[in-house]
Amino acid sequence: MTLGNPFPCITFFFLSDITAHILTAFVEEFCPDKKALESISLSRHTVIRRIETLSKDIERKLKEVASNFIYFSIALDESTDNSDIAQLAIMVRGIDDQFSITEDFLTMSSLHGTTTGQDIFDNLLKELKDFNLPLEKLSGICTDGAPAMTGEHTGLIGLLLKSRVWNVSPIMYHCIIHQENLEAQHLEMGHVMELYPQ
């Protein structure tokens, strides 16, 4: 996880302007004493520093929780942002020995250049290593069904299965939301929607 910019698709200048506006509105609403607002620094550098501090703290806490997982599953989605850079979003759901389940956004990382199964595989291994999540504890993988994700030989799932680190292979899922979207593109269901007035 790159901490220099915890939100790679949002520039810090834009984010700091939004944060300053929200904080100003909050203080004006809930703090009738306007002097409290004057003592809070809302400069761009201060807001950036605070966002980075929060990001590091969230990452530290997630690493602490993840270190206790006995098994975990991941959901991955690759998409391209408005500046034509592929972003890989990784969600994690893990369970510890007390049967406490944690589900959280793990990271979003940029894939510069190509987005082949090998690129996604290498990036996933790097991110899992950063969070001390060994492949041996991976029990499930959910993807969007794209060939780079599900390819038997060169897709992410094929490469994961070739690594042969499990006694029992993880369960592979095709995201239900992506399935519904694909079905909606091919089914003619306009007559169903006509029954319901808007």
Image (cartoon, rainbow, N blue to C red):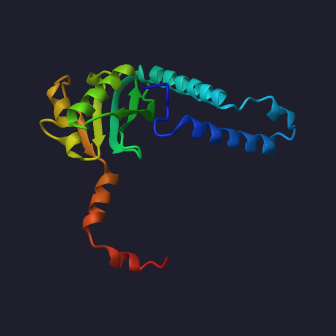
On screen, residue 13 versus residue 186, left or right, reads right
Image quarter in which the N terminus is found: top left
Q: Quadrant of residue 167?
A: top left
The answer to whether 193 is drawn above or below residue 176 in the figure is below
Residue 55 in picture, x, y percent from top left:
54, 27
Residue 170 in picture, x, y percent from top left:
23, 33
On screen, residue 37 versus residue 140, left or right, reads right
User: Closer to the camera, 193 or 168?
Assistant: 193
User: Closer to the camera, 10 or 68?
Assistant: 10
Residue 148 in picture, x, y percent from top left:
21, 41
Tally of marks: 0
The answer to whether 22 is drawn above or below residue 193 in the figure is above
Residue 151 in picture, x, y percent from top left:
16, 41
Q: Residue at x 33, y 42 (%)?
A: 77
On screen, residue 42 versus residue 84, left or right, reads right
On screen, residue 178 versus residue 8, left or right, reads left
Q: Residue at x 66, y 27 (%)?
A: 46
Q: Residue at x 27, y 33 (%)?
A: 120
The answer to whether 185 is drawn above or below residue 136 in the figure is below
User: Closer to the camera, 158 or 116?
Assistant: 116
Q: Residue at x 56, y 26 (%)?
A: 52
